[in-house]
Image (tube, rainbow, N blue to C red):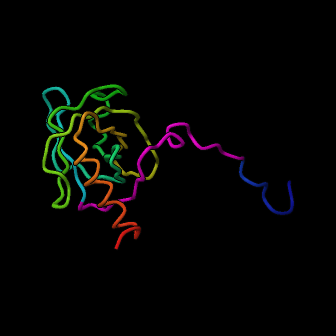
C-alpha cells in the first residue's frame, strides 16, 4: 500500500481546437438558449453552456445523440436571448462532448458560419461587456 501524498495528476495538453479559438468565449446561464433543426426534428429552447462570436456549446437532450455527428449542418439556427442578433445563423456541429455532469444531456459544439460582420461584432461586444472588458 502506498503512503504519502497522492501522485500529481498527469499533465494535460490544451486541445488544438481551444488553441485555435479566434473569439473569446464565456460561460453562460440558462437564459441563453438556441433553436435549430436536425433533419426533420426541430429543437427549441436548448440551453447553452458557453458562447462566443464563433460558436457555442449547446446542452442537447441525450435522446438526440443518434441524430448528430461532427460536420452536420444545422438548419434554422437562431440564438434565443434578448441581447443576441435576431437573424438565422448558418451553423455546423464541430464536436460532441459527453461529460459526466450534464445529467441527461450532451454538449454539442456548434460553429457559426457565414454570418455578417455585424453579428460577430454584436456577440463580441456582448461577451466583452459581460466579462468586464468594456464599461
Q: Residue at x 41, y 48 (%)?
A: 23
- Left or right: 43 with respect to 134? left
Query: Does 18 appear in magenta?
Result: yes
Q: Is the magenta stretch mostly helix, strand or loop?
A: loop
User: How far from the left and from the top, in percent, is residue 120?
Assistant: 28, 47
Q: Quadrant of residue 106?
A: top left
Q: Give the range drawn in magenta.
A: 11-31
- Left or right: 56 with respect to 97? left
127, 134: nearer the viewer:
134
- The residue sitting at the bottom extreme is 135
Q: Which residue is drawn at 27% across and 28% down?
A: 67
Q: Which residue is drawn at 30% across and 28% down?
A: 66
Q: In which quarter of the image is the C terminus?
A: bottom left
15 lies above or below 23: above
37, 86: nearer the viewer:
86
How many numbered markers are drawn? Answer: 0
Q: Residue at x 40, y 66 (%)?
A: 131
- Left or right: 122 with respect to 50? left
Query: Does 68 appear in magenta?
Result: no
Q: Quadrant of the N terminus?
A: bottom right
User: How far from the left and from the top, in percent, is residue 61?
Assistant: 28, 43
Amino acid at each position: 500500500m502506498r503512503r504519502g501524498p497522492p501522485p500529481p495528476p498527469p499533465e494535460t495538453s490544451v486541445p488544438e481546437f481551444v488553441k485555435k479559438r479566434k473569439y473569446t468565449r464565456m460561460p453562460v446561464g440558462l437564459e441563453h438558449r438556441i433553436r435549430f433543426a436536425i433533419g426533420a426534428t426541430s429543437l427549441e429552447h436548448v440551453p447553452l453552456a458557453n458562447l462566443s462570436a464563433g460558436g457555442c456549446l449547446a446542452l442537447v437532450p441525450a435522446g438526440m445523440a443518434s441524430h448528430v455527428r461532427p460536420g452536420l449542418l444545422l438548419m434554422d439556427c437562431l440564438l434565443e436571448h434578448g441581447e443576441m442578433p435576431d437573424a438565422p445563423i448558418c451553423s455546423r456541429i464541430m464536436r460532441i462532448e459527453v461529460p459526466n455532469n450534464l445529467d441527461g444531456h450532451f454538449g454539442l459544439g456548434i460553429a457559426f458560419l457565414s454570418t455578417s460582420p455585424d453579428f460577430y461584432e454584436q456577440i463580441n461586444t456582448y461577451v466583452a461587456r459581460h466579462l468586464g472588458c468594456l464599461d
